[in-house]
Image (spheres, rainbow, N blue to C red):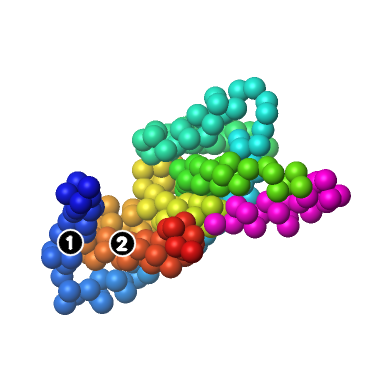
Amino acid sequence: MWVPAVVAFLVIALPVLGLLLEADWARMPELLTSEAALAALRLSLETAAASTVLCILLGGPLAAVLARGRMRGLRTLRSVVLLPLVLPPVVGGLALLYLVGARGLVGEALNLGFGITIPFTTAAVVIAQTFVAMPFLVVSLEGALRTAGERYEAVAATLGASPALTFRRVTVPLVLPGLMSGTVLAFARCLGEFGATITFAGNLQGTTQTLPLLVYIQRETDDAGAIALSLLLVVVAILVIAFARPRTTEGIR
């Protein structure tokens, strides 16, 4: 197994090594502390955090329904929920644009009724990131719920615990590693989101220009800047996954 395993690792690691070799290390501090880079990093972290909270608040109950529900059509529902995993992000951005855009089904009502315009705003970045990242949390949490089973919840119910108490004291501790893993993956996916964001939110510095979008712009004019920002994204992603992911998800007890 070592031969294909090493090849697989090299497929992932060598492109990052290529960035390291091509980086202009003498200009690295200047490139990473530019006004545009700091603004994009700040916006990326803020929107990714907001999107991850939305993923937890909305995706958590959805995962519970998929794992515990008994109604018909759950398989179809699960297929729709997982659609952003395989859908090209730019298609997701177009779908969001035609839903909540000025002439969209929801967007027109919001604009006419409340004067709210969502596309090409920071809120649009959060919505786009939530759209592409929520399946990661749902998949992790649903798997944790199915693995935990319902026996402990049933025992708690026989002892007189209310559903709310059972959920808080039994279910949540059991699925916490899966929830943390899904949260980390969702946050990392939000940080790297590009296609849906640029289609639905645009690329406005200080408003919608996240770090991946700035990399795209820099690639056209300054290769050194694009490489420096790419490496910054790589470092942030590695830190998030390495230090925030629960040890139990790696098989370590």
The residue under label 2 is 234
Horizontal and vertical percent position of residue 3: 17, 49
Residue located 41% across and 46% down the image: 197
Residue located 56% across and 53% down the image: 179
- The one nearer the camera, 202 or 112, is 202
Image mark count = 2
Horizontal and vertical percent position of residue 42: 44, 66
Residue 160, magenta (yes or no): yes
What kind of element bears circle 1?
helix
Earlier in the chain: of badge 2 and badge 1, it is 1
* Mark number, residue 17: 1
- The one nearer the camera, 55 or 156, is 156
In this view, the residue farthest toward the top is 72
- The one nearer the camera, 179 or 102, is 179
Instruction: Classify 80 as above or below 238.
Output: above
> Tag 1: residue type?
Leu
Left or right, 213 with respect to 103, comes to: left
In this view, the residue farthest toward the left is 21
Residue located 45% across and 53% down the image: 185
Left or right, 176 with respect to 237, comes to: right
* Mark number, residue 241: none
Our reading of the magenta stretch's main secondary structure is: helix
* Disc 2 to disc 1, C-alpha distance: 11 Å
Which region of the structure is painted magenta?
Answer: 156-177
> Tag 2: residue type?
Val
